[in-house]
Amino acid sequence: MHASFRWIFNLSHWFVGNLALLMSLVTIFLAGDLNAASFLPTVKHYRLLFAYVIVFVCVHIVLSFQRCVHGVEGDVEQRTATALI
């Protein structure tokens, strides 16, 4: 009964998690301009952050794609194994 609404939980969990990650990346970029920060951001600082974001986004996309592909296969295998028992 509750399994029919699982997709709503999965979608909302994915959305909230990605929103939190996006806000954390924006916060990291904005933190360099704060007066309370003990350093002045330089071009090197922004290049490093930009490289981090690029690597993070690439890894996130690859892992999300992998989860979509293998998550569906895993569900089918689990249902098949359960049906055989």
Image (spheres, rainbow, N blue to C red):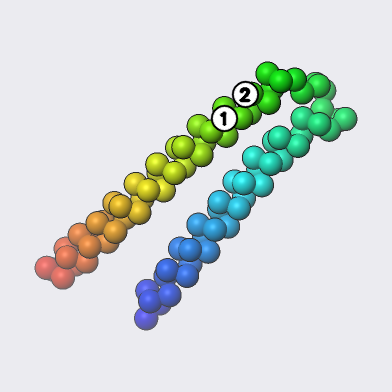
User: Which amino acid is tagged 2?
Assistant: Leu
What is the secondary structure assignment of the residue under circle 2? helix
Q: Are marks 2 and 1 in contact (CB under 8 Å)?
A: yes
Would you say 83 lies left or right of 73 here?
A: left
* Residue 5 placement (x, y as % from top left): 43, 75
Q: Furthest-left residue in view?
A: 84
Residue 4 lies in quadrant: bottom left
**Residue name at image x 86 percent, y 30 percent:** 36
User: Number of marks in the image?
Assistant: 2
Residue 51 placement: quadrant: top right
- Establish if 6 lies above or below 1: above
On-image quarter of the C terminus: bottom left
Residue found 77% across the figure and 23% down from its top = 41
For image coordinates 35% across by 54% down, the residue present is 68
**SS at mark 1?**
helix
Asked if residue 79 lies left or right of residue 26, the reply is left
Q: Tell whether 43 sits left or right of 37.
A: left
- Gap in Å between the C-alphas at discs 2 and 1? 6 Å
Mark 2 crowd level (few <14, some 14–19, many ≥20, 10 Å Cα): few
Q: Is residue 36 left or right of residue 42?
A: right
- The residue sitting at the bottom extreme is 1
Which residue is under mark 1? 52
Residue 2 in the image, given as x and y percentages of width and height:
40, 77
**Mark seen at residue 16:** none
Q: Nearer the viewer, residue 7 or 53?
A: 53
- Residue at image location 65% in from the left, 43% down from the top: 24
User: Disc 1 marks which amino acid?
Assistant: Tyr
Where 69 sits versus 56, above or below? below
Count neighbours of disc 1 (C-alpha within 10 A) and say few if under 14, some if 14 to 19, many if 20 or more.
Answer: few
Which residue is identified by label 2? 48
Q: Position of residue 1 (x, y in %)?
A: 37, 81
